[in-house]
Image: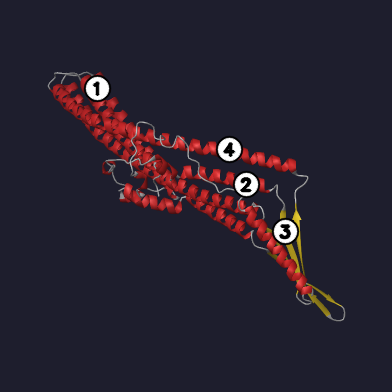
Amino acid sequence: MNKIIIYKIHRTIVSCIFILTMGSCGIYETFQTPRYDITDKAYGDIISPDTASTGNIHWQTFFQDEKLHALIGTALKNNADMQSAILKIQVAQASLKASKLAFLPSFNVSPSADFDGSWDVQLPVNASWEVDLFGNLRNAKKRKQAAYLQSGAYMQAVRSQLIATVASTYYTLLSLDAQYKIYEVTGQSWKQNVEVTRRLMKAGKYNAASLSQTEANYYNVCNNLIDIQQEIQQTENQLCALLGETPHPIERGELADWLAPEVIHVGVPLHVLSNRPDVKQAEYTLAQAFYATNEARAAFYPALTISGNYEFRHSLYDIVGSLVQPLFQRGTLKANLDIAKAEQKEADISFRQTIIEAGIEVNDALVAVKSAREKAENYSKQVKHLQDAVKSTQLLMKHGSTTYLEVLTAQQTLLEAQVNQVTNHLTEISNTITLYQALGGGR
């Protein structure tokens, strides 16, 4: 008879739980990524979107320098920020696992023993189960899922930034090498000018002031070589830090080996920007806030906990269900809900602003690349004409048809133009890398 009654009680409890749980499923909506009116025009009017996207190209294809490949591979393996991002994923994964286990009952064993002429051993098992009647546990799990996805987006953001930083630093190093060669060749040429000026002074064609000015310019170039060598050493050290290694020389190619993509495809803003890790992070932050608001709402509803214990020796058990309804916490619960709503609104604003800034970043980088490419042709022509001018003034000086000041001016102008040409080349490369990253590249 007792077994029949207990069975009916069990069946009634389970039926009630099932009905309440099913009824609570429709209380909360699932998070949907908002669609803003600014998304389609995120790049601005200057860009005509297309179907392809350069950001989808794998970094090993986008960068074609094998030595750079090796450096990026080492950085992805050893960099401290990258390792920290991986650990953040593990933490989020463990937290998500814990939220899933919250749906299961918990069991505790409390063994005890008494001795009164003979041993009396008891091994009771206690169990408790919180029934997710109104979605509190379910929303907590979804919030942890969003946090887990956010940690993955964070890792991708770190990865993308690391690849771009290693590449930019690498090409900065190559540009310094190129500048060093320019100053080195210029120094050799100006040293010859010193000897020529010295001979002309002995021949009575120039005075001591001419020789002093020529020598001063030569030593200025020597100092520039020392400065560039220092910058090279420091840039190598920066690369070593990114690689997670102690300072050492960096094996590298030449700046002229850079192969820029002829056409950069920007893709459709809605698709491209949604794949950017920083945009994904902002989206998952909004999702977490959405489910946190649902949790705050669920706190207003009663919580059902079923507990029971079983004693193996005597085969005794009991089951108790407790339904707890918040009565005197309405002020606190209302405040918590208001806070959650405000944080959700804040996350929504942040998500929208992230999309705007991402589009501006694409626009800025594309304009910078376009400008650098247009200037490259002008620098090439300028350097060629200045090289001709230097040769002409040197010949005129040897025949006494011009002064040393004209030669020095022509040489100085050529040097500046050559350095500016290298700097502009680096600007094009750096902004191309920035554009690649802005389009979600670095996977």
Q: Quadrant of the N terminus?
A: bottom right
Residue drawn 62% across and 46% down?
294
Q: Nearer the viewer, mark 4 or mark 1?
A: 4
Q: Position of residue 318 (x, y in %)?
A: 77, 68
Q: Residue furthest right?
A: 116
Q: Position of residue 403 (x, y in %)?
A: 19, 18
The amino acid type found where label 1 is placed reads Thr
Q: Is any part of residue 225 visible from this angle?
A: no
Distance between the Cα atoms at labels 4 and 1?
A: 62 Å
Q: Nearer the viewer, mark 4 or mark 2?
A: 2
Q: Secondary structure at mark 2?
A: helix
Distance between the Cα atoms at labels 1 and 3?
A: 89 Å
Q: Secondary structure at mark 1?
A: helix
Residue 409 is labelled as 1
Say above or below: 310 vs 57.
Answer: below
Distance between the Cα atoms at labels 3 and 4?
A: 33 Å
- Badge 4 crowding class, 10 Å Cα cut-off, few under 14, some 14 to 19, many 20 or more, is some
Q: Nearer the viewer, mark 1 or mark 3?
A: 3
- Badge 3 crowding class, 10 Å Cα cut-off, few under 14, some 14 to 19, many 20 or more, is some
Q: Residue furthest bottom?
A: 118
Tag 4 residue: 345
Q: Position of residue 290 (x, y in %)?
A: 58, 44
Q: Give yes or no for contact between labels 3 and 4 (Cβ–Cβ under 8 Å).
A: no
Q: Position of residue 83 (x, y in %)?
A: 49, 52
Q: Which of the marked residues, 2 or 3, is nearer the chain's N terminus?
A: 2
Tag 2 residue: 294
Say how many tags the image has: 4
The amino acid type found where label 3 is placed reads Thr
Tag 3 residue: 305
